[in-house]
Image: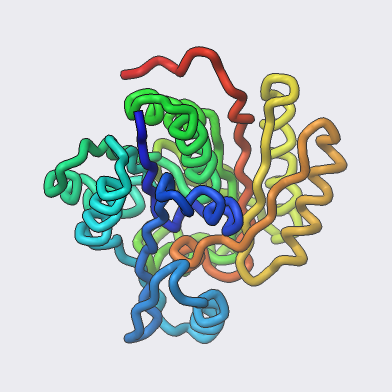
Amino acid sequence: MRTAVVTDSAAALPADWVTDFAADGRLTVVPMPVMVGAEIYGEGEDDITDTIAVALATGTPVKTSRPSPGQFEQAYLAALRRGFEAVVSVHISGALSGTADSARLAATRVGIPVEVVDSKTVGMALGMGVQSAVVAAADGRPAAEVRAFAEDRMARTKVYFYVPSLEQLRRGGRIGAAASLWGTMFAIKPILAVDDGKIVPLEKVRSAARAVARLEEIVVADAAARPAGQARLAVHHFGNPGEAAELAGRLAAALPEVPPAQISSLPAVLAAHAGLGVLAVIVGESSTPQKEPPLVR
């Protein structure tokens, strides 16, 4: 069965990897809109990293929105025209964005079966699931199995991150005003996680240096507890590539059996909420080929 995979730019997929699999239409990444002041940009369509960084530094409003149903409709119809028989559409957590809702609406308008998946995660935790889906699709798996491979891998990922300030998360409605004010008053540097699709506090630390060190400790403990040879890491940053490289280096030294972490800038749609100076680490597991797919729901 020929199955196409659609996702959104919050998946933080490496550009060269996307290029390899998008050529025949097997993978489509729908850009998520980012509004900087009065201007609207498309993630992946416009070079907006510097624009957002300047906006965040100067206090210019930065907001995000979900792609329109029409954008997904176009992606699904393109798959149909290319001869695909089904689509698996995997998206950023529904608790953080209405993207999956747009995809579901679009799915009702097209003449090709579409399985919409709320990943309940973000960044390369979502990206790892998409990669597993694409590999399963390339292997000729039916849509239900492609979905199952994606969901299985995403269920085995964790997202941990540190933000220097909670203000941008407050502005975007991802945390409450009281939490932001409390954090600011007491100089708290929070370590956050994504749990069941939502951003939740993990620990509260009193200094930036200690917060980054504790983030590293949490990641090392998680990765070390994974099945032998299976742990995989990704590090995201925004405006602080040097810090990300240093963190990745320390993780490599602490986890010599784990492949080096993939380092990339946080997608603009996520950076708009996390703010400058964010450090995020995704802990996942290898997408080892299996003779049998995970349990299909």
Q: Residue at x 47, y 41 (%)?
A: 130
Which quadrant, please, contains the C terminus?
A: top left
Residue 80 against residue 208 in the figure, above or below = above
Residue 170 against residue 225 in the figure, above or below = below
Question: What number of labels is visible?
Answer: 0
Note whether residue 162 is visible.
Answer: no
Residue 64 against residue 29 in the figure, above or below = below
Position of 202 with respect to 175 (left or right) is right
Colour mapping used in the image = rainbow
Q: Residue at x 47, y 38 (%)?
A: 134
Q: Position of residue 131 (x, y in %)?
A: 52, 40
Q: Residue at x 51, y 45 (%)?
A: 127
Position of 159 with respect to 27 (left or right) is right
Residue 285 location, quadrant: top right
Note whether residue 215 is visible.
Answer: yes
Please tell me which residue lies in front, 116 or 96: 116
Q: Position of residue 282 (x, y in %)?
A: 60, 43
Q: Residue at x 36, y 34 (%)?
A: 2
Please tell me which residue lies in front, 1 or 213: 1
Farthest residue, direction left: 109
Position of 250 with respect to 283 (left or right) is right
Please tell me which residue lies in front, 282 or 59: 282
Q: Position of residue 63 (x, y in %)?
A: 36, 72
Q: Position of residue 211 (x, y in %)?
A: 69, 53
Which quadrant, please, contains the N terminus?
A: top left
